[in-house]
Image (cartoon, helix red, strand yellow):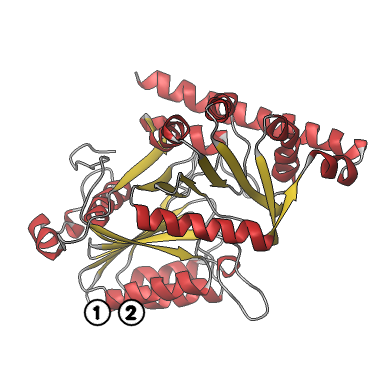
Amino acid sequence: MSSAININTAFTLYNKAELIRGGRNYFSALHDMIDKASKSIQLQVYIFEEDETGKEVASRLMKAAKKGIKVQVLLDGYASKGLSTGFKYSMRESGIRLRFFEPIFKGGNYYFGRRLHHKIVVCDGIVSLVGGINISDRYNDMPGTPAWLDWAIKVEGEASFELFKLCNQCYSKQPDDWLLLPKQDIVNALDTNLHCPIRIRRNDWVMGRNEISASYMEMFKKARYEIIIMSSYFIPSLFFRNNIIKALKKGVKIKLILAGISDVGIAKNAERYLYRWALRHGIEIHEYNHNILHGKIAVADGKIVTIGSYNINDISALASIELNLDVEEVTFSKDVHQQLMKIIDNDCSRISPISIIRTYRPSERILQWISYETVRLLFTLFTFYFSKKRNAKK
């Protein structure tokens, strides 16, 4: 990546933030942003599928490009490999600049290596969506099939311009003059009456970025009474777990909202292996059973929130390219807290030591241990490769 564009990772101030739940609400907001854009649209996402949801988003992007709006799309080369040649051609023919982030060690049925896990949309450098939501029917409310549980944050203001610069930098190793917007135009559009501190946080081990992991450590250190974490694939490292324990020893209550139904069976079994560790230390575990949980969000003391693409495991910490936003604003944070507590109360089952004994036979607990050790081995292989690559660059 070029260092020619300076990305501000400190808190920006002049922002307005809105929590958006995945599904119909998210895609309605996305469609509205695309339709109202007048200068530029940037989309970076892990999964873009050629289904009803993907076709609708692509149609709106192509319509915008044909009107002369500069549209830049960056997709992960593995997760979005299913797009047909005709679909990609139509997008490019309309004027969209479409590129793929190509992973290392890929084949038809496998993928080992670094991946672009961003889920970002930025319009005109002033309004953006950041979260864990991909472009696919699974993340949308379809007839008779509700969306997977996920979240995004809609930001209007200063942080969106930083995201604009970041997307431009990620898309090209050199700044893309085709999509540079005058900073003064953005400054003139800012509403300085707004005050919502937001900072961009990234994890990309290859590039020496470990900011999202640091945000969680900061939460554990500064929290006084409660942290609620929703995570779709919760397999924390020993270092992460030790910091949770430090927070618990200070009297901080830790509540986890985890998947009851998972799209990755081995990851869920590995996660359940850690339940006994969590319960032994007094952590509350709540399994969401209404649908597949895909959200990645946490709130501490109803004061600060982190939200984005980051899963709490070593793939996100040490392999994937991840992006979260930290929001330090009471009104937004209280809304997040209320929404998560509502889900705990209405859509979750609390896990207890007795329920583990009653629910999982010894053979199932052995399978959980095997799954955990298998996943841990895979994490070690991934992170060992990237640690070697990073050290070779020094």
Q: CA distance from mark 1 to mark 2?
A: 6 Å
Q: Which quadrant of the view contains residue 112?
A: top right
Look at the numbered disc 1 and give the secondary structure of its residue: loop
Residue receiving disc 2: 63
Q: Is residue 291 visible?
A: no
User: Is the residue 392 above or below the residue 170 in the image?
Assistant: above
Looking at the image, residue 258 lies above or below residue 145: above
Q: Are marks 1 and 2 in contact (CB under 8 Å)?
A: yes
Residue type for callout 1 = Lys
Could you tell me residue 262's position as x and y percent?
70, 53
Residue 193, relative to residue 250: is it above or below? below
Q: Which residue is mark 1?
A: 67
Q: Quadrant of the N terminus?
A: top left
Which residue is located at x 58 percent, y 47 percent?
A: 231
Label 2: which secondary element: helix
Please state which of residues 324 and 222 is positioned toward the viewer in this rendering.
222
Residue 169 location (% of width, % of height): 27, 47
Provide residue 381's location: percent of width, then percent of height: 61, 27
Q: Quadrant of the C terminus?
A: top left
Q: Nearer the viewer, residue 127 or 264?
A: 127
Give whichever of 51, 329 is nearer the camera.
329
The answer to whether residue 293 is left or right of residue 7 is right
Name the residue located 41 percent from the left edge and 31 percent from the top edge: 206
Q: Residue 284 bears which disc, if any?
A: none
